[in-house]
C-alpha cells in the first residue's frame, strides 16, 4: 500500500528542505518505498480533518491503510522497522541506531529550535541580545560533543542508519545560522548524507513543490 505523507503547501524555507517532511521523504527514498504527498496550508493544518491525524496541527503525518502517524521520529522509525536498509540486523546495533535517532531529537535538536525561536519570534525583545549568545553556546557544546564522538568515522555507528538520517536532518537546520561551518567534520558529515542519491531525490521532490508554486519572473 502506498503511504501518503503531508507537507507544507508553501514552505517558509523556500525549498531548502528544512521542514520535517524532508526526513520522512528521505527515509522513504532510502528504502525505495514510493509515496504520495498531500500538501496542506497553514489554515488547513489547524482544521479538524488534519487534527484528527495530528493532534498539534502540524506536518508531517503519515497514512498507510489503517495506520495514521505523526511525529517525524516515529514515522522514520516505523519506515525503518518495516523495510530493510535503515536499521542494522544485529539487535544491539539496531538499539544503538535507535538511540541516535532519539539523541538527534531529544538532545541535539532542542537548542537548535531554541535558536530559531530566539531569532524569529523573540528577536525584538529587550533581553534578546543577552540571550542569543547563551543559546549559541548551548548549541556549540552539543556540536563539539557530537564532533568528538564522530571522530574520523563516516557515520555515527558503523553503516549509515536511521540515526544518521535523523541527525543529519537536525543538523541541516543550522545551515542558515552558519554554525555548522565552525565544525568542518560535522559539515562534511552532513554533506555525506546530502550526497546520497536518496537524499537528492527527496530534496528535489520537496523543491519541486516550492518551484511549482512560485510565479515565474
Ligand atoms: N516534533 C514534531 C515532528 O518532529 O514531527 C514537530 C513537527 C513540526 O514542528 N512541524 C512544523 C509545523 O507543522 C513544520 S517542521 N509547523 C506549523 C505549525 O506548527 O503551525 C518545522 C519547520 C518549519 C519551518 C522551517 N523553515 O522554514 O526553515 C523549518 C522547520
Image (cartoon, rainbow, N blue to C red):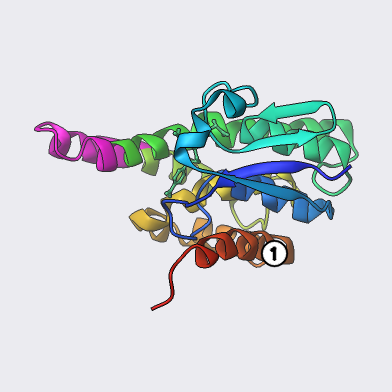
Residue position for label 1: 201
Residue in the image at 59% along x and 32% along y: 103
**Residue 91 seen anywhere in this rendered image of the structure:** yes
Residue 110: percent from left, percent from top: 44, 32
Q: Kindly state the secondary structure of the residue where label 1 is placed.
A: helix
Lateral position of residue 117 relative to residue 154, left or right:
left
Comparing 49 with 6, the one in front is: 49
Q: Residue furthest bottom?
A: 217
105 lies left or right of 78: left
Q: Residue at x 56, y 37 (%)?
A: 59
Of residues 134 and 53, which is closer to you in this image?
A: 53
Residue 33 in the figure: left or right of residue 194: right
User: Is 159 above or below relative to 63?
Assistant: below
Question: Residue 22 location, x and y as percent?
Answer: 60, 50
User: Callout 1: few (<14), some (14-19), or many (20+) C-alpha neighbours within 10 Å?
Assistant: some
- What is the x, y in percent for residue 146? 52, 44
User: Where is 44 relative to 164, above or below?
Assistant: above
Q: Quadrant of the C terminus?
A: bottom left
Q: Which secondary structure type mostly characterizes the magenta part of the structure?
A: helix
Which residue is rendered at x = 52% and y = 56% of the image? 186
Which stretch is magenta? Answer: 118-138
The residue at the point 85 percent across, 42 percent down is 88
Q: Which residue in the rendered view is the most extreme toward the left? A: 126
Amino acid at each position: 500500500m502506498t503511504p501518503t505523507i503531508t507537507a507544507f503547501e508553501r514552505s517558509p524555507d523556500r525549498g531548502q528542505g528544512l521542514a520535517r517532511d524532508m526526513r520522512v521523504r528521505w527515509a522513504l527514498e532510502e528504502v525505495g518505498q514510493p509515496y504520495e504527498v498531500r500538501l496542506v496550508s497553514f489554515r488547513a493544518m489547524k482544521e479538524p480533518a488534519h487534527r484528527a491525524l495530528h493532534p498539534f496541527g502540524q506536518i508531517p503525518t503519515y497514512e498507510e491503510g489503517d495506520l495514521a502517524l505523526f511525529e517525524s521520529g516515529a514515522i522514520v522509525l516505523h519506515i525503518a522497522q518495516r523495510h530493510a536498509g535503515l536499521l542494522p540486523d544485529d539487535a544491539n546495533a539496531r538499539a544503538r541506531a535507535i538511540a541516535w535517532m532519539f539523541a538527534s531529537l531529544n538532545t541535539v535538536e532542542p537548542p537548535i529550535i531554541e535558536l530559531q525561536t530566539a531569532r524569529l519570534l523573540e528577536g525584538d525583545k529587550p533581553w534578546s541580545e543577552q540571550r542569543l549568545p547563551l543559546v549559541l553556546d548551548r548549541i556549540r557544546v552539543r556540536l563539539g560533543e557530537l564532533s568528538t564522538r564522530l571522530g574520523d568515522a563516516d557515520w555515527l555507528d558503523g553503516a549509515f542508519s536511521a540515526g544518521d538520517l535523523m541527525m543529519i536532518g537536525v543538523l541541516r537546520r543550522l545551515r542558515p545560522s552558519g554554525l555548522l561551518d565552525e565544525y568542518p567534520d560535522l559539515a562534511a558529515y552532513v554533506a555525506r548524507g546530502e550526497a546520497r542519491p536518496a537524499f537528492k531525490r527527496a530534496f528535489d521532490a520537496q523543491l519541486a513543490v516550492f518551484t511549482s508554486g512560485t510565479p515565474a519572473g
